[in-house]
Image: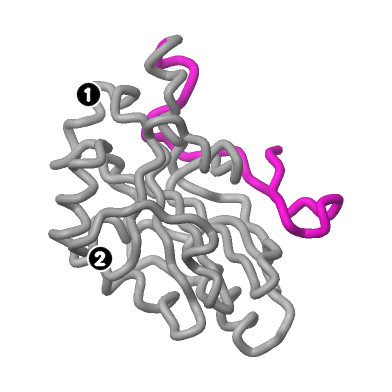
Amino acid sequence: MGRWERYSLESFRDADILVIVFTCDHCPRPRPTRTGSSDWRPIQRQEVALVAISPNDPAAVRLDEMGYTDLGDSLDDMKIRAKDMEFNFPYLYDGADQKVALAYGPVATPHVFVFDRARKLRFVGRIDNSDDPKRVTSHETQDAIEALVAGKPVAVEQTQDVWLFDQMGEKARVGAESVAGCSEGKGRSRIDRRKGNQGARQE
C-alpha cells in the first residue's frame, strides 16, 4: 500500500459486504497482521470490502509488552507493517482518539464486524477459533461471508471468544490496571436486535 489517506463508510459504498477488523501491530495473537495478505485471502472476495483498523493508543502500550513484537502501534509502525506484509486493503489508524472503536465497540483484537449490503450487522466476533493455524477447526468470519454471498442466513451470528483487549487511551491516563494487556478477552460484542440488527452492544 503506497497511499495514505482518510476513509469513511462512503469509501466502501460499492461493496456488497463490508468487513471491518479491529487489529493491531504489537500483540502476537492478531495473526493476519503478522502474516500478510495471504492469511486474509479466505475472506477477501470480489463482493467484499475488507478494512483493518488499529484502535490502539501507542502511548498505552507498556514497555514490557514490546518484548514480543518488532513494532509498536503508532501510525508510522503501521505503515511499516502494511508495507512488509504487502497488505492489499486499507489498514487504518484510530489511535489518536479511538472515535471509530468507541462507536463500534470492539473488546479485543482481532475483532470482526461483518455488514451486509444494507450495512446491517450480520456477524460479530472472531476470525476463527485459534491463533495457531494448525489448530483451526472453524472459520466463523469466512462462513458468515459465504452465507451472505449465497443469500443464506448466517448460522453463527456472534462468537464469545475474541482474543486480546484493546489498548485504549485511558490505560495510559489512569494506569495499567484499567485495561488488560495481551490476555484473552472475556467480553463480547453482541448484535443488538433492538437497533434493528444495525449496531453492537457490550456484555
Residue in the foreground of this view, choosing between 40 and 126: 40
Q: Residue at x 44, y 51 (%)?
A: 110
Question: What's the residue type where badge 1 is placed?
Answer: Asp
Image: 4 above or below 144: above
Residue 183: x and y in percent read 42, 35
Q: Relative to 85, is 121 on the left or the right?
A: right
Direction right: furthest residue: 194
On whether residue 179 falls in the magenta region, the answer is yes
| Magenta-drawn segment | 175-203
Please say if 25 is above or below 74. below
Distance from disc 1 to disc 2, alpha carbons, whole Å, reads 28 Å
Quadrant holding the C terminus:
top right
Please tell me whether mark 1 or mark 2 is closer to you in this view. 2
Display coloring: one colour
Frontmost residue, 196 versus 41: 196
Residue at the top extreme of this rendering? 174
Sequence-earlier tag: 1 or 2: 1
**Residue at which label 2 appears:** 87
Q: Is residue 198 above or below residue 93?
A: below
Residue 178 belongs to the span the image colors magenta: yes
What x and y, as percent, mark residue 52? 40, 56
Relative image position of residue 109 (x, y in whole percent): 43, 46
Q: Residues within 10 Å of mark 2 (few under 14, many from 20)?
A: many
Query: Which residue lies under the disc numbered 1?
Result: 64
